[in-house]
Amino acid sequence: MKPTIIVSTFPDKKSITKIANDVVKSKLAACVNITKISSIYAWQGKIENTPEYLALFKTTTKNKKTLIEKIKSVHPYDVPEIAEIDVDSINKPYLDWLIDSTN
């Protein structure tokens, strides 16, 4: 089974904490890393400079599609970022834990 990381940003800690707890509890992700960031982006003709929360959802390719659908269904943004990072290399003990945590 292959590991993958799904990346998304959220407007506040409350929204990401809720979904992170839900997907870990339901075993769609083994872990979600959350960090506060500052994002600069173009939106509706203006340049925005906004604090956000970056989330890294650690999962397997088996759960990827369901996890992405879950994120889409509850995401508070009109146009959420939901990107995938392919993991080409990962240490075996962590991969074993990841697979065990999402089965």
Image: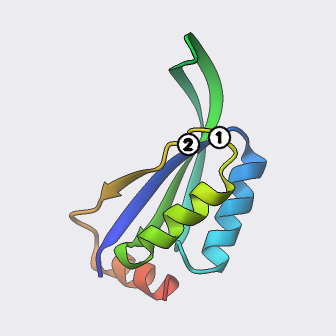
Q: Position of residue 40 (x, y in %)?
A: 52, 20
Q: How many labels sit on residues? A: 2
- Tell me which colouring the rendered structure shows: rainbow
- Mark number for residue 86? none
Residues packed near mark 1 inside 10 Å, few (<14), some (14 to 19) or many (20 plus)? few
Mark 2: give few (<14), some (14-19) or many (20+) Cα within 10 Å.
few
Q: Who is closer to the viewer here, 27 or 101?
A: 27
Q: Residue furthest left?
A: 88
Q: Residue at x 48, y 89 (%)?
A: 103
* Left or right: 51 in relation to 45: right
Circle 1 sits on which residue?
77
**Vertical placement of residue 3 versus 96, above or below:** above
x, y (%) of residue 6? 44, 57
At x 59%, y 59%, the residue is 71
Q: Amino acid at mark 2?
A: Pro
Disc 2 target residue: 80
The amino acid sitting under disc 1 is: Tyr
